[in-house]
Amino acid sequence: MTFSRYLNLKDPRMLTGILVTFKLLIHLATNSIYGFHRDELLYMALGDHLMWGFQEVPPSIAVLAKLAGTVLGDSVSAYRLFPAMAGMATLLLACLAVIRFGGGYRAVLFTGIALLISPAFLRMNTLFQPVAFDVLYWTVLFYLAPAVAKKTPVPSDWLLLGLALGLGMLNKYAIVFAGIPLAAALLILPSRTVFLTRWPWISAGLALLIWAPNLIWQIRNQFPVVDHMAELRDSQLVHVSAADFILGQFELNLVAGLLFIPGIWFLVRNPETRIVVWMYGLSFLLFLLLSGKSYYLAGAYPVLIAAGGVWLEAKMAGRFGKWIPGAFALMLLLTVPLVPYGAPVLPVQTMKQYGTWMADHAGLKPPLIWEDDTVHDLPQDFADMFGWEEQVQSVASVWYSLPDSVREKTVIFAQNYGQAGALAHFGKAYQLPWPVSLASSFYFFGPGEKPGTYVLSVGLSREDLAGFFSSVSLKRIHTSDVAREKRVEIFLSEGSKATLQEAWPGFRNSR
């Protein structure tokens, strides 16, 4: 017997297994080339203070952070194993959707390759952030939509749907932008009769039961998520136009754009799968009206791409079928140069040179545009993976330069959650105290026990501090040519007008 008899690449399920395994290998090979991202440092800090909710996210990412740090080890690759596994599951569902739609091994191959080399999906499955799991839960909902739209309910489909919705709400509230369109699509289409059965209500009850602890936490803490959404709208979403969002759907998918557009056509022609198109259209409209970022809709595309793969495979038997593999290969060749924007495969200085060259000679500036709407020499997420430990080293050098009598009364105060997360994580090796910060969920961790006789601040300006302290002394300026935070001032302040404990409650509305 030969090995080829067991490795049948024309078997859609076997090919699916190979593609999913390759997905994991890609991330295992690349996910520790750069350091921790600022968001990852925040979620790791949340893992040290487990609660049923936080200002910016529900609790599941903190639980995963605690699990990674405790069981897998305190390394970049340990934390990033989870988003890689979420990416594997997403790819698996997309390939299973191909099979469910009647596609063969070619459709699986088209779908798998399109998702494997997509810079957007590479990025989302690299970083330890809720978005990787959000995409997975969205994919589950889109995958299940045709099944739950059947006139005769299958209990297991509805229970799985409720489980995905509930877990999705514990991960990222954006799942409602898939859940609401699904419910609306069920009502619009003839499938509305399913609401006369008990299973949609059991599914909704299961989702609510799973989400309930976080909902109760939000109520008890006066809905911190509302403050976070307001801050997000004012600082980031204000830069997103309708044109940006629409164009972003094509930038998000690139080669997969060859598939998701015909995928919509394939799905809309079949009454049994039409609900997927309704879901997509309604989700698209909601994000368009609310100035959502383009990647917010990413979870809709794996199933649309799968449908497109089936459509493309069917067209290979037609008049222009012989041109399809060549066209697909050309799209791949055009996408491969963009892979370094998705996964950190290049050393950072090489990536800076590559990004600059592509912006100047290929017009590829969008990946280098940050939240401030200006072009930089690195993608923002990449720049956010550098400089954190060095920043903490600078703080530690100032900390240990202080007299013992001053140090024992000094609080370390961070201006943003990246600085606070870095101090919380890397500060352990330098025996620094836990940082105090008003940023994000650090506010809920409180001011600590020290009254703030002395405050060693990181990232604040002299003007920020002058209104609260009688003496403000610049101790060090930390600089970096790679990190997003290129210049950070470190001050020692004393003579506060009130203790941190006295002032803390009044800071909530001024953050």
Image: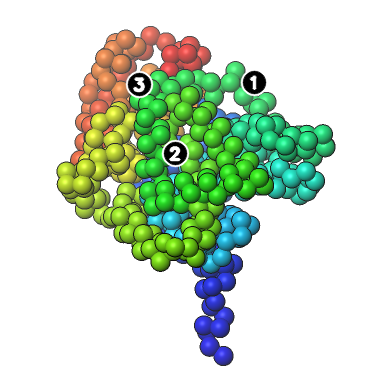
Q: Nearer the viewer, mark 2 or mark 3?
A: 2
Amino acid type, callout 2: Tyr
Of 315 and 291, nearer the camera is 315
Quarter placement of the N terminus: bottom right
**Residue at 54% across / 73% down in the picture?**
10
* Position above or below: 471 against 389: above
Circle 1 crowding by C-alpha within 10 Å: few under 14, some 14–19, many from 20:
few
**Residue at 52% across / 73% down in the picture?**
9
Which residue corresponds to mark 1?
Answer: 220
Of callouts 3 and 1, the N-terminal one? 1
Question: Is residue 95 toward the left or the right of residue 422 in the image?
Answer: right
Q: Nearer the viewer, mark 3 or mark 1?
A: 1
Quarter placement of the C terminus: top left
Of 335 and 25, nearer the camera is 335
CA distance separating discs 2 and 3: 43 Å
* Position above or below: 493 against 174: above
For label 2, the SS is helix
Amino acid type, callout 1: Arg
Question: Which quadrant of the figure has residue 479?
Answer: top left
Question: Is residue 274 toward the left or the right of residue 229 in the image?
Answer: right
**Image disc number at residue 454:** 3
Q: Nearer the viewer, mark 2 or mark 1?
A: 2
Query: Could you tell me residue 263's position as x and y percent?
Result: 51, 49
Q: Are marks 2 and 3 in contact (CB under 8 Å)?
A: no
**Image disc number at residue 295:** 2
* Position above or below: 272 against 496: below
**Residue at 25% across / 18% down in the picture?**
462
**Residue at 35% across / 21% down in the picture?**
454
